[in-house]
Every structure is written in C-alpha cells, then in structure tokens.
Amino acid sequence: MTGSNDGMPPDEAVGRRRFLGYVLAAPTLVAAAELGVTASPDIRPPSPDIRLPSPEITEILDLNDMMTLAALPTSGLVTVEVHPDGTVSFALPRAEVGQGITTSTAMLIAEEMSVPLDRVRVTLADARPELVFNQLTGGSNTTIATYTPIRVAAAVARLRLLAAAAVELGSAVTDLALKDGVVTARSGASVGIGALAGTAASTRTRQVPVTLTPREDFTVIGRPQNRIDALDAVTGRKKFTMDLDVPGAKPTMICRPPTINGRVGPVANLAEVRAMPGVTDVVTVSTGVAVRAETFGQCIDAVRALKVSWKPGTAEGKSDETVLRELEAAELPIGLRPPTPVVEERFTFHFRSNSALEPNCAIADVRADRAEIWSSLKSPIVAQQAIAATLRLPVGRVTVHVTEGGGSFGRKLFSDAALEAAEVSQKLGKPVKLMWHRADDSRQGRTHPMATSRVRVSYLGDTVLSYKQRHTSVSTDLGHGLGEIITATAAKLPVGDIGFSETFFQLSQTMSYDFGSSSRLLSETDKGFNTGSMRNVYSPDVTCARELIVDRLAARMGRDPYRFRRDFLRNDRSRAVLEKAAEAGGWGRPMPAGTAQGIAFHAEYKSVSAALVEIDCRPETVGRPIRDGVAGPRVTKAVFVVDVGLVVNPRGLEAQMMGGIMDGIALALTSSLHLRDGYFLEASWDNYFYTRQWNTPPELQIIIMPSGSEKPGGAGELGVAASMAAVACAYGRATGTMPTGFPINHGTLSFTPKPTVPPVPPSPTDGLDHAR
Amino acid sequence: MPEYTFRVNGEQVTVDVPGDVRLLWVLRDILGITGPKYGCGINVCKACTSHVNGRAVNPCAVPVADLRPTDEVTTIEGLAATVGEDLHPMQRAWIDHDVAQCGYCQPGQIMAAVALVRRVAAEGREITDADLDGLRNICRCGTYFRIREAIRAGAKDM
C-alpha cells in the first residue's frame, strides 16, 4: 500500500490528486470521469525473469490490479448528474447485493461535491456493453476500481457549479464556498446547487482538470455511515426482482430433473396440468418444464403434479466418494519427500451451496423484435450477450435492468434464471416472473466445488525450508466475463500460457509467511457440476489447510501458534493485525478442557486480516438440543482485525467482516452438500446448515486498523478465509485432533432427504398452529 | 371461485382464489404486498414471517381458507401503524444498528423480533441469550450479531 504524504514535497502530493475529467454536453450538469496518466494503478512492471510458479506473484500484480487495469480504458464513461431539485444522481455500473456499495459510492460523491448524503441518489446501471470490462462485480474490486473515477466526476461537477455560482452571485470563484449543497459568497449571498444545474451545464463536451480533496480534509469518507437503503429495507419498501410489478409478468416456475442437469423427456399429463386452477401455460424448455400461473403457490402445485420422463444428467451415479477418487487421480505431484523433517497432510472440502436467501430469479418480457429483462446480475453485459444469442436478437434489442439483489455469495455472477426467463417468455410469447423453488436452488443451483488440498512443509531446526500446496478441485466455472478480462490483460501478465483457473488461483493466493521456497498449484477435474465462485473463492479452503499445518508445524517445533505466526509473517502490516487480534482476544488465557482458542491470518485484495476465535467443544454444548438444525461446537467469541488501507465506510466494513465470520463458521463446522447417486441430498434450509442464531458467537469484536494509505483495499469477501481457518484451528486445539475433512460434521447426515420426484416439497398447511 | 375475507394491515380485504393457496402468495401475487419474502415455502427459513392477531406466523404455511374475517394479518408494511408511528421501535433499532445488508430477510427478522419481545414481556422477564438463540430466521448475509444487539435495544423502547 502507498504510504501517507508525510515527507513528500507538497507539489508531488497535489500531483497525485490531479486528474482530468469531462463535463458532457447535456441540458443539466453532467460530469464524467476519465482516468488521467496519474491514475494508473501503482504497479511495478513485471520483471522479465519471472516464471510460474514464482514465490510471490501477488507482490507484482494481483487479481485486483488486473481487474482495475482492465477497467481503465472505459472508466471515463461514468457520470455524475446534478438535477434542478438539488439532488445528485449516479448510475453505478455494479450490482448491489448487500455489500453496501451504493452507500459507499454515495459517500464518495457527497465528499467531493460537499452535498448532504441524503441528496445523492445511487441507482444501478442497466447493462452497458460499451463499458466492456467495467461492469463486473466481483473479486472485492468495486471500491478499489471506482474510488478515483467517481470522485473525479464529482470534482468536475463541483468545479462547474462553483463557476456557475460565480456568475450568478457576481463573485470570484475564490470567494465562494460550497457546503451542504449550497454555494455561499463572501458577501453572504447564496444559491443552491439545484438552481445552478442548468447554468452549470455545457453545450459541448470538454475536458476539465481537477484536484481531488486531500485525505486530511475528508469529512465523509472514513466516518461510520449507516446504509442509505436502511429505511427501505426495514419497512419492506426495498424492491427485489420478484417485488417488481411488470405488467403481465405472471409467476413462473420450472419442474426440474431428479439428478444434476438431467434432461427433459416427454410429459405424460400436459393437458391435465394445464387445466389446474390458476395455471395459464405449461411448456417444455431446455432445463425442464415451465409452468406459468396466477400465483407461485399454483406453480408449485402444478410442478408437483407434472409427470415427466427424465434422461440422465451430467453427474449420473456420482457421489462424494467417487468425486474424491477423481480428485485423488487429478492431484499434481508434490515431489519427492525431502530428507529433512516434514509436516504433511491432505484436507478434504466438500461441496457447499452458495444459495442466497433470494433464490435465482428474473423477469423477462420478450417480444418478436426486442426483449426486456430484470434481474440482479453481477455480470450484466455477459448476460445481455448470452440472452441475445439465445433469443436470436441483436444485442442492442435486449435491455437488461440490474435490480437490487437479495445476497449473492457468487451466485449472481451468473445469469441462469435470466436466461431461462428469456427462453420461457419467448416460447410463450408472454411476460414471465420466473423464480427457482428453494429445492431447485439447492439441488440444481451452483455450488462451491469439492476440493482437496495437500500440504507439505519441510523444516530444519528453527527454519522452514519449503512450503508446497497442491490444491485439487472439481472445476470452478469462471465463465462470467472475468475470462474476457483475462484475455484482454493476458499479454501484460507474467503467467505465460498457464490455464485460466490457474491464473485466477495464482493471482488470488499469496504466501504471507517466510517459509523458504514456496509453491502452490491448482489442478481441476470434472466439468459435470454447476459450480461458481463462492464468496472468497479458493481462499477459505487453501487458507484453512495452510493455517492448520502452521499450527501443527508450530507444535512440532515446540512453539506457541501465535508467536510462531508473528515471527514468520513477512511484513509489519501483517504482524500488526495478528498482534492486535492476540491482544484484543486475550490469546493464551487459561480455558477449560474441551474449549480452546484458535488464531489465523489471511491476506488478499490488498488487505490483511487476522481472526482469533474461542470454541466450546464440550459434549453438553455439542449435544444441546436444536430442532431441525445442527448444534455442534459453539464459537463463543470471535475477534477479527483488518487493515484494508483507506476505509470509505467503517460501519459497512465491519458488516462485511461480520458476514465473513458467519460464513467461516459455517464452512468449518456445519454447511455442506452431500452428493449421492448424481444429486445433492440437501433441498432446503432445514437440510443445509448455514450459520444460525444458535451458532452465532455471543461475543464479537471487529477492529479496523488505522492506516495512512491513500488507497482502499477490497473487503466484501475478505472475512471468510481467516475466520474459517481460525475456527478449524480452535477446534483442533480443543479436541486435540487436527480436523482434515470439512465441514467437520459432514460424516453425519443430520436430516432425512426430501424426495427428488416431485422435485419440490409441498407447502405445509399448519402455519396457524405454530403462531407464537 | 370462493371468496375469502380477512384483514390486512388494518383494512378488510376479500380475495377470489382457491382456499388452499397459501397466504404468502395471496399477499404477494394477488394483493401486491411484497414485504414478506419467499425463501423456502416450507416454513423453515422464516423470511415471510408476519403477524396474525399479533403473533408470529409464516404465511407460506397458511392456506387462505384458514383465515376468519376478523383475523388481522400484519405484514412489515403495517407494523409501524400498530403503534401509531412512522416507524416501530424495532424498525428504529434496526436502522440505528445498521442491521440490514442485502435486506431480503429483514422484514421477517423484524416481525419475529417484535413477536419475541412481546412474548418475553408477557412472561414478565428480560430477553436472554437463549431467547435470541431460539430465533430461527435465516440471514445468509450473516447479520446475526447486529440482530441480537438491535433486538435488545428495540425491546427497551417497546
């Protein structure tokens, strides 16, 4: 990270804040940002002798640098608009799925324009193909990539408003102050920015140099801010896709196959189901049989009534055991065992679901010559192109509206429901509001692929000589547009001709410890599953395996796990978060038998993090009664310390870490999918055990480290890896046995699997009996 | 088709729909009341939690025919009006604690929280950790800790 301006000549400090923006020809003030030469990310040119596997490629270029670079040529097209009512609007070319980027974006604009936050309206931009690589939400990259361009656009607007006010108030610009959306002259005369929106507008597009507000003058950025959509969220006014009222778009559901990607055959009772109450249409589509009805309840009834012949899918007959054998066969060699002492282990990570609480869903209105789609999409340009191809329409005739998403966790990188909705709407010639049943979302939806991670560390005396990790995974589908970025940027990368996933893997992983020669390699196998990048992608598993090995290595060397990590971490910034976690969490305090602390470290997204957790594995805790759920060991305390560089919204950052901790607890202890006979047994939230209130740590502390950095790091996925690893380490220390399979309860099936035919369960009828 | 009459958020409504259609779909697809969310359809995720006569109920598991004309259904949209304010104290606590992330589950969380506080108050005691552990509403964003803080704060103002 870049340091502060301390000791730097003043003109150089200003130079780093000077950029070129645009004022666009428009009836009201529209300012746009284009990154100037000074805006290039601070990336050292790769040295020509770098070859993979290199020790630390992420020190030269990481995934976020690559995404930022890929976004550069078109970033100039983001615009801030001032309206006559004094509001400022900005259409964010990203997806808000709960991570708080509409709030942090509004903060950037409020800061640079000196307007109150509640007058900044941030909406989500429709798919804009001209943005090419600048409309992908992923890799925790939003704030990193947009931090400067959004402020530049706002600064241009501010400059134009001041110039217009100077004419209006008959005053020199230097005698004007802009505050709270009002320009005031030294004489005391004032004018609101709304009144200036027209006069500040330009009849032609022109370039405008601006200097951004220096960090020491920030009054909005860096201060805790509640979500701008909080009121809508708590009153039920916040609109998700299925809450939109699109004329004629009636509830639609798909009857899906009993096995993963099974193919649809003949339907025996089409006429009968078409005659069911409320049903308007039944039609066979590529993924199953679509039912459109007056209510989703009637869709569920019709789906359950359909008698469909199904053909085999893409994972026919497969189970956890057979996939594990595939992974063993695909594992890359770890080399000959060295003559020195080694610590070695292979860890297994089972399939996990990245289902959000809002299931896959989309609205589609497809006409003969055009289509309109509404869905929460993190890669809307790819969706638009794919939908156009499916419908055989020109891309320009497909409008894709990005709606607010009810969670993503990687799901919304893909547009499965949008593609389906478009297909159904075209086939029926009617608008549809298509939603996956939870059972579909769980059984046919995308998953975090099953993986193994083999680690071998060799050491001698107090020195670690080498660290090798061979990560082997069912293929992760990354075909959501990141591929285009990779293609565009590949020539600039020192990664030669290695594969696409390997590139992603190498650019997202880093070795933070001084462990001698280090190598990490990814091998993938089996493309028969519906997979995707689940929050934090490879890192939770890779980090969990590494941190467990670190604990074992420390024990072998007779060292305390915390002090061992502190001594081997490679830089002060990393050590600082670890030390803070140990101090705040009371590392080493005496604890009863069956309970223990665990500590872990993780670096990614230009950020560093450390987690300390306490776990209670005593039988009376593990066996506490929970109806239709899993109790298991209880994480009783979690302390999470993070340094993300410059923080835009500390309150939002804390929220993201809190969510990451809950994910980490689930990944370590309770949440997985069980594969049997070509399908996942889990069909709903009473089968899939994501963290619940009874698993939540009653004590939770999140500490944000002060940073002099001028640049923000990524945060949306950051909290998961260290949390999962710390929970695993604590479990190992509490039970005296290092866990090697995750989640730890995967071997026990804690529910009775629901039938696969019909594919969705009936809704209960006893709701009133359970009123409480 | 049969007609069913009941009260929603203070108003009498009559719907023309088969009696086995669950209340969730009557609210969302027929009446356009979209605060209660679908998350499972089998009464396990609790995203649709609303109140019937002041008690927490999951409309995904209630056939509309089970409602009587005098039954008062309250969704998140009608919660504030039950205390005659713009916002219910629990909604205010939710905003103060910045609980919501994606927000999808939060209407159900708030309705469950209000019912819990009323239940505990009726038993003449304070909210305990065990009470909070007993909440079954899923939040996939993992806002559980702030939910716990907000419930304790909101309870003080109820």
Image (cartoon, coloured by chain):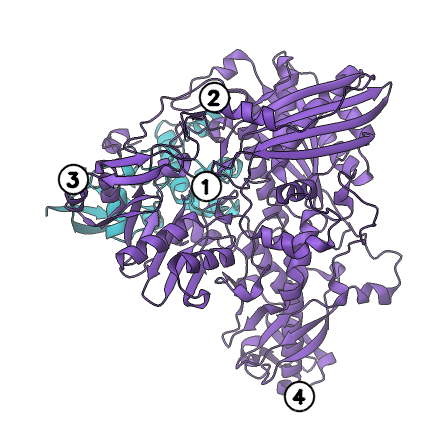
A344 on left or right of B64? right
Mark 1 lies on residue: A356
Q: Is residue B32 left or right of residue A674?
A: left
Contact, mark 1 vs mark 2 (Cβ under 8 Å): no
Chain of residue at mark 3? B
The answer to which of marks 2 and 4 sits earlier in the sequence is 4
| Residue A549 place in picture, x, y as percent | 71, 23
- Same chain for marks 4 and 3? no
The count of marks equals 4
Kindly identify which numbered label has been placed on residue B65.
3
SS at mark 3 in the image: helix
- The image quarter containing residue A22 is bottom right
Q: In the rendered image, is residue A243 in sight?
A: no
Spot occupied by residue A253 in the image (x, y as percentages of width and height):
30, 45
Q: Earlier in the sequence, mark 1 or mark 2?
A: 1
SS class of the residue under badge 1? loop
Q: Residue at x 49, y 57 (%)?
A: A380
The residue mark sitting in front, 1 or 2, is: 1
Q: Colour of chain A?
A: purple
- Of residues A674 and B122, the one drawn nearer to the viewer in this rendering: A674
Q: Which chain is cyan?
A: B
Discs 3 and 1 share one subunit: no
Q: Where does the C terminus of chain A fall, quadrant-wise?
A: top left
Amino acid type, mark 2:
Ala
- Chain on which label 4 sits: A
